[in-house]
Amino acid sequence: MTASADTSKKQSALNLPSLPEPLVFFVDRSLGRRIIPNALRDAGARVEVHDDHFSQDAQDQVWLAEAGTRGWVVLTKDKHLRYRAVEKNALISAKVRAFVLTARGDLSGAEIGQIFVKALPTMRSLCATGSNPFRGTCESRR
């Protein structure tokens, strides 16, 4: 028997493809602290909430930069975010993946939570295949 026949045929850990980190969704302060984050968690998503990391009056460019650094996927309903130059530049420079809920009329927290829960498979797919930064839009069909 040769020496090579005795060696293990297991693949080295160095040769294994790296698995993507699990997505973490960052819920902006505009979406609240409980109802929407809990709906996402109940659907199996990993969630971080704005107020657990930043003060209520933290400037958007500050938390956007941190979200980008940490690789968090931002969820917000602040549709003006994409029009303000400072925030838009923060999104782009931090390579933030963000989904902005644009809805007609007033939706309850439970309704918004269900919209994001329903969109989870699509958001995950876009995050896996899309380049950063990008902004997606979740539209409600009310």
Image: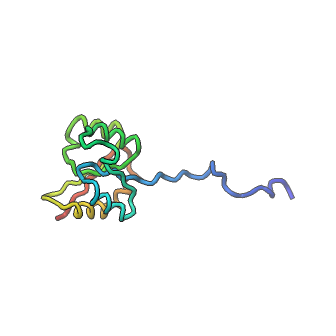
| Residue found at the far left of this picture | 105
Q: Position of residue 39 (x, y in %)?
A: 31, 63
Q: Position of residue 31 (x, y in %)?
A: 24, 53
Q: Tell me the residue at 18%/57% (across/down).
A: 103
Quadrant where the C terminus is found in the figure:
bottom left
* Left or right for 34, reference 16: left
- Residue 37 at least partly seen: yes
Q: Tell me the residue at 22%/64% (across/down).
A: 111
Q: Tell me the residue at 83%/53% (across/down).
A: 3
104 up-or-down from 87: above or below: below
Q: Quadrant of residue 109?
A: bottom left
Q: Quadrant of residue 101?
A: bottom left
Observer-nearest of 34 and 71: 34
* Left or right for 122, reference 138: right
- Residue 121 at least partly seen: no
Q: Quadrant of residue 54?
A: top left
46 up-or-down from 72: above or below: below
107 up-or-down from 133: above or below: below
* Left or right for 127, reference 142: right
